[in-house]
Image (spheres, rainbow, N blue to C red):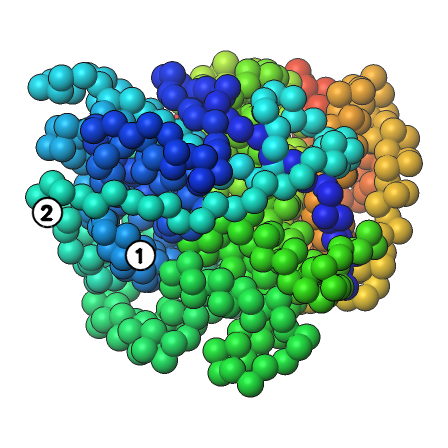
Amino acid sequence: MSLLTFPRFLSFSFSPNTLSFGRPRSRFPLATSKGAESSAVDDSVAVLWFKHDLRIDDHPGLVAAASRHRTVIPLYVFDRRILSRFSDEMLELVLVAMEELRESLKDQGSNLMIRFGSAEKTIREIVKEVKATTIFAEEEVEHELRKMIDTVQETLATAPLLERSPEVVMWQTPFYDIKDLKYLPPSHHDFKKLQLPITSPLGPPRLPSVEIGLDWGPLPSVADLKQFLNGNPSKSKEDWTSIKETIAEKLLLNDQKDQVEPPNTLIGGMESLKSRGSNQINLNHEQTQRKRLQKSVFVTSKGNLVGGGTNAVLNALAAYLRYLEGTGRDDWQEVHEKLRNAESRDGASFGILFGSALFLGIISRRRVYHEAIKYEKERNAGFLSPFGYSATSIAAAADAVCSMEWYWLMALKSQISDEGPFSIRIWRWNGYLIQYTVVGHEGPAVLLVHGFGAFFEHYRDNIHPVADSGKRVWAITLLGFGKSEKPNVFYSELMWAELLRDFIIQVVGEPAHLVGNSIGGYLISIVAGLWPALAKSVILINSAGNVIPGYSSVPSSKERRTSGAAWLGARFLLPFLRLRLPSIVKNCYPAKMARADDWLLNEMLRSSYDPGVLVVLESIFSFNLSIPLNYLLKGFNEKVLFIQGTKDPISDSQSKVAMLREHLSGIVIKELSAGHCPHDELPEEVNYIICDWIATIESKLLLV
């Protein structure tokens, strides 16, 4: 059984009626379905905008809409800004979930309206057609989706020929019971002390039948969606799809012979950027239909992800929770087989199998928790043990959704508060929440990547000064660090490099000057070596990684799994790091020890109590830095700057600098009297060096 189990009392919920962002929006106190249905119903029309909430079970927005309005129009808009983030397999899941959602709504006497185009224009047209007075939409934490919701409301507020601007009501599915998010403790350690209960899920509401004659629209196929995505994409710089295609083309056509060939584990990431042929799409669709006829819960052509409607996912969850019992049912045996194949470490299979269904909202987080606890009680004669769960599968499901909710709460709090010197944005990568910030409105793009155990704020005195010199600066907190999510996955240098690759393509949207400290330096070196079209230059600050003369080949990449030694080592290392944190950090700041201040130490200590931190620590024991820096960067002649603190207690600075000068042609090296983090210890000096370097590189690029 996993030792990361959440005791059942470590949870609480909040009602969002006091929250606000952007334009003022209405929020309602979330009641039980029984209480909601007893509310007064008027004759007005409401539109319920589905996004990542493809269910009618445990859907507070649907409950509220049905309890207040005589007519409710369920709507899903195929918007390129949403669809372009999905893989082909996710598109398959979306379509199957929507088909099941439409059938569920029809069973209630309603239907699901399907439209293609921008959400703001589509919703404006629907509002005008049905004379809707209210729009219900789920609260979002992702920056792009929040911006889309703002655009929808601005469009409605300024639309001509509307008698009045409809009210936009934001809803949530509250997992914990907290009345005001501003009182959310910053530390999960303090959060657990509240010991507040988890709220119960709602059943499907009774929906009013739609008596208006409407064109509900056909459900498309995967081929239809691909054609929609690839047809007439916006040519603006902000359009995600066109940016992705442009960079993908550069990647695929790049013929620089000196660049590193990508290991097999990363080729798939590049291949995913290529558009699939129509024959393959049709084959995938046929395979999906065949799987559904066979009653498999793994409905996509690849067969890796649990999908379908809510009932199908609940059935798969029941099989997953009862793994230890065994079964004679074919569908449950299939789930058990997939569980075994996906269990790279204790509990990791749950996120792999059910993560996409949770992301699409086919099932709610609190429904998963409710089902896990219900089964735990069944196993224990109605009782819950204070010593943890009785089965690893139960712990995996309950821990995963509790962890997801914690990071979602932190992400939402960052969006509605103005605390701190940086505006926090949220990006979702592979379903996980990633924090980042961006400063500056013009000039070349710069991406700052922190080291192990840090976060983007470690560049606290670099972000604004570099941006003020005429740059656009992005700083990211990597998966597993700071306030970014820490899921139960296998962390590796290749995984983080792929994250950075996707961030540059999806968020930055153009090649950038890459800046990395410590392990962050090694990660950007991988990005530059494997995907050179994404990097204008590379700036390494006391970078991890070796220099090996004569290195000529990349070792074959084998699947890595967590070892028993890594599991045990992380559990000894964590309390040691917490106890010795001040001395460890101060030792890395020999020139200006005062820069290792209380804010930095407290934030590092805070993140050490986040759920999932032990899994991240295990990665220390499995890092593979065998590909040397001189090999990764050999195609970047005169585009590599190495800033080295000569008093670094972690590495032999003198030897490393000498080896780099000898074996990496054209490298520029700047030595400073600093420790392992010169950018934070001597920010003024490092900022000047970085800005001067970028100006030099940009002038050369202009000549080219």
Instruction: Please indicate whether residue 539 sits to the left or right of residue 543 in the image.
Output: left
Q: Residue at x 37, y 45 (%)?
A: 205
Which amino acid lies under the numbered mark 1 shown in the image of this protein? Ser
Instruction: Please indicate whether residue 49 sits to the left or right of residue 563 in the image.
Output: left
Visible in this render: residue 380?
yes
Looking at the image, tell me whether mark 2 or mark 1 is earlier in sequence order: 1
Which amino acid lies under the numbered mark 2 shown in the image of this protein? Asp
Residue 98 x, y percent position in the rendering: 30, 55
Using a 10 Å C-alpha cutoff, classify the residue at mark 2 as few (fewer than 14 neighbours), some (14 to 19) or many (20 or more).
few
Residue 504 position by quadrant: top left
Quadrant occupied by the N terminus: bottom right
Residue designated by label 2: 215
Marks 2 and 1, how far apart in space?
Answer: 18 Å
| Vertical placement of residue 236 versus 261, above or below | above
Residue 687 x, y percent position in the rendering: 61, 20
Q: Residue at x 23, y 71 (%)?
A: 282
Residue 601 position by quadrant: top right
Mark 2 falls on what kind of element? loop
Using a 10 Å C-alpha cutoff, classify the residue at mark 1 as few (fewer than 14 neighbours), some (14 to 19) or many (20 or more).
many
Residue 333: mark:
none
Q: Residue at x 10, y 44 (%)?
A: 214
Visible in this render: residue 687?
no
Instruction: Please indicate whether residue 136 sits to the left or right of residue 517 in the image.
Output: left
- Which is closer to the viewer, label 2 or label 1? 1
Quadrant occupied by the C terminus: top left
Residue found at the far bottom of this picture = 328
In the image, 13 versus 541, the foreground residue is: 13
Residue 69 x, y percent position in the rendering: 27, 32
Residue designated by label 1: 104
In the image, 86 versus 324, the foreground residue is: 324
| Vertical placement of residue 502 versus 237, above or below | below
